[in-house]
Image: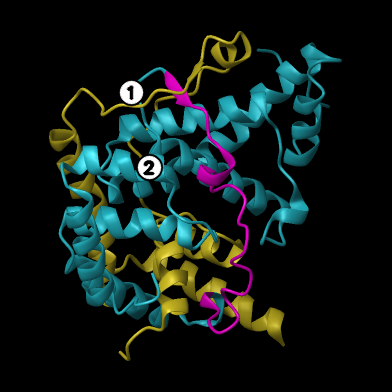
Chain colours: A cyan, B yellow
Amino acid sequence: MYINEEFPSNGIQLLKMIANKNDDKETATKALHLFVGIYESKIRKQVEIIANNYGYNETVAFEAIRCAFNKVWLYPTFDMRKSHCKDEENAIVVWLVRIAVSQMFQYAGQGECAKIKDEEDLSVIETATDFVESFHASELTAEQKMNCVLFLEKKMSALDEKHRIIYLTYKAYQTSGKRLPRKLLEKLRKRLGLTQATIRVYKKQACEALNDLNL
Amino acid sequence: MKELTIEELEVLLCSTGYLPPRNDEELTFFNEMYDGYKSRLEDRHVDVDAIICGSCEVGSKYQLPEDSQDSYMGKVAEDIHGKYSMAARNFGNLPKSVLDKMRKQHNIDDENED
């Protein structure tokens, strides 16, 4: 599609144009093309790597990305005031990645995006507001960062895949100030072939291994 | 290294691709760590026209994916681990360009704080 060079490339402006699609569909259509063109490459790695850590392949990651942009078209609800980012571009990337991860948790097969209820939506962090008060990653030296990553990798490698998936699924919601929705818990049971009692035990074991006793 | 607090653990999980990032810091950390990672999705692009014409379906049912994840997953894990553990196993094995970039970023952070 031809995009005029004077068309804005600011994500917030593009989202406003998309939101105005009922009054000016042509402009909204151009805006979505441009928005996807800008942000698709910015969220690709994140979603692919997160998907892998939850036991999904890149096809699922791609579906999650596609569904995230589908949601942008249907419900362009981005609100800078609800973001924990100071930078607008980062805020949009974080918002999109979280929508994609919410979609990934609901993955239903190729070609279908999930209707995400509020409780299942990770794109708005509700209560986890003072999470980085004690630890600022940006203050670490490169070597310290690497040591942290090494240390975390070692701890995470102690978990087998099922323990890791269970722990991370619960943790994704907890760090957003939410409880794991019942529907997703059911999906987790089916996907991993485990009973709820076993999931509970695996979660406890994972938390003990990581010394994360508040989950 | 001393045991991580829960807050530190959460920041690292959100910074390294285990959980989605929550803020600028976590996003930047991730981008630094995976600077050299080549996505397997680079040649795949979202069909924007399909979204606009509404053929990108939104459904409420959910089920397990039909195809086996195992074969794909092993390959992706291998790709990620190959790239990532090269960096993680030994700091000295990081490519000079990555080290320079991280140091440069760190210096910029320092200057900004002054």
In the picture, the quarter occupied by the C terminus of chain B is bottom right
Q: Amino acid at mark 2?
A: Leu
- Point out residue A85 in the picture as x, y percentages from the top left corner: 67, 60
Tag 1's secondary structure? Answer: loop
Residue drawn 34% across and 57% down? Answer: A168
Examine the rendered structure and indicate whether residue A89 appears above or below residue B39. Answer: below
Name the quadrant containing residue A111. top left
**Mark carried by residue B78:** none
**Mark carried by residue A109:** 1
Residue B64 painted magenta = no
Between A74 and A63, the residue placed more toward the observer is A74
Examine the rendered structure and indicate whether residue B6 appears above or below residue A126. Answer: below
Q: Is residue B43 left or right of residue A41?
A: left
Question: How busy is the neighbourhood of tag 1: few (under 14 within 10 Å), some, or many (20 plus)?
Answer: some
Looking at the rendering, the stretch of residues picked out in magenta corresponds to A112-137
State whether residue A63 appears in this view: yes
In this view, the mark in front (2 or 1): 2
Residue indicated by mark 2: A184
Whether callout 2 and callout 1 share a subunit is answered yes
- Point out residue B52 in the picture as x, y percentages from the top left corner: 63, 13
State whether residue B90 appears in this view: no
Q: Is residue A3 left or right of residue A184?
A: right
Which of the marked residues, 2 or 1, is nearer the chain's N terminus? 1
Q: Chain of mark 1?
A: A
Between B107 and A184, the residue placed more toward the observer is A184
Q: Amino acid at mark 1?
A: Gly
